[in-house]
Image (tube, grey):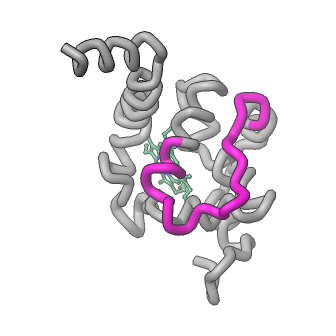
Amino acid sequence: MVLVITLAVLLLSGVVDAADDAQARYLLHCRGCHLANGTGVPPDVPTLVNEIGRLVATPVGREYVVRVPGVSQSALDDEGLAIVLNWILEMFNADTLPADFQPYSAGEIAEARKKVLADPLKYRRTLRLHGTRAPN
Ligand code: HEC
């Protein structure tokens, strides 16, 4: 009974709902290419595991994450993308996420996604990633 009440309170307060919601969005909009566990299919589809934590360590890398076509052109709205990206960082990038990381906001997404990258792979090679000897 206590468990039922606890679950009901969690659901009502949106705690369980929010996490489920983020995962549901990921599964619907990103899994098709990046797979359920985020590993992708390198080299065609990059992994989202630990790489994104390294990318968000610099302002330009943080913006790049939103500008890649799979993100900027997504059917998700700004709020939905912020939720999914923050979830990816929390779930798949705990080992590389900077200690001072501030979650993406819908406003930040709205600005960055306007600047869709025409050639993301080429642009990515210009980024200097924290902890990487040769950018790939
Ligand atoms: C149709 C397949 C596809 C879908 C769907 C897709 N992506 Fe991607 N994603 C790619 C490919 C391919 C790349 C490599 C860059 C490029 O060619 O666009 C990429 C690159 C990325 C990168 C940059 C990774 C890096 O290390 O440079 C991020 C972050 C990313 N995707 C996140 C997402 C998120 C979040 C979603 C869901 C909202 C998503 N993608 C949906 C195919 C996809």
Q: Which residues are magenta?
A: 87-108
Q: Quadrant of the C terminus?
A: bottom right
Left or right: where 72 falls relative to 38: right
- The image shows a total of numbered marks equal to 0
Quadrant in the rendering for residue 66: top right
Looking at the image, residue 46 lies above or below residue 20: below
Residue 11 placement (x, y as % from top left): 38, 15
In this picture, residue 27 sits left or right of residue 54: left
At x 43%, y 31%, the residue is: 19
Residue 40 placement (x, y as % from top left):
37, 57
Quarter location, residue 25: top left
Where is residue 83, by image quadrant? top right
User: Which corner quadrant holds the N terminus?
Assistant: top left
Residue at x-position 36% and y-position 60%: 39
Q: Is residue 44 above or below residue 83?
A: below
Which residue corresponds to the image point at 57% horizontal and 59% vertical from the top-left? 52
Magenta includes 50? no
Say which of 35 and 21 sits in front. 21
Decide: is 37 above or below 12. Answer: below
Q: Residue furthest front?
A: 2
Depicted 36 relative to depicted 82: above or below: below
Q: Residue at x 77, y 41 (%)?
A: 112
Instruction: State the residue in front, 122 or 19.
Output: 19
Residue placed most toward the observer, 9 or 126: 9
Q: Is residue 79 left or right of residue 115?
A: left
Residue 56 percent across, percent down from the top left: 68, 58
Q: Is residue 89 magenta?
A: yes
Residue positioned most to the left: 1
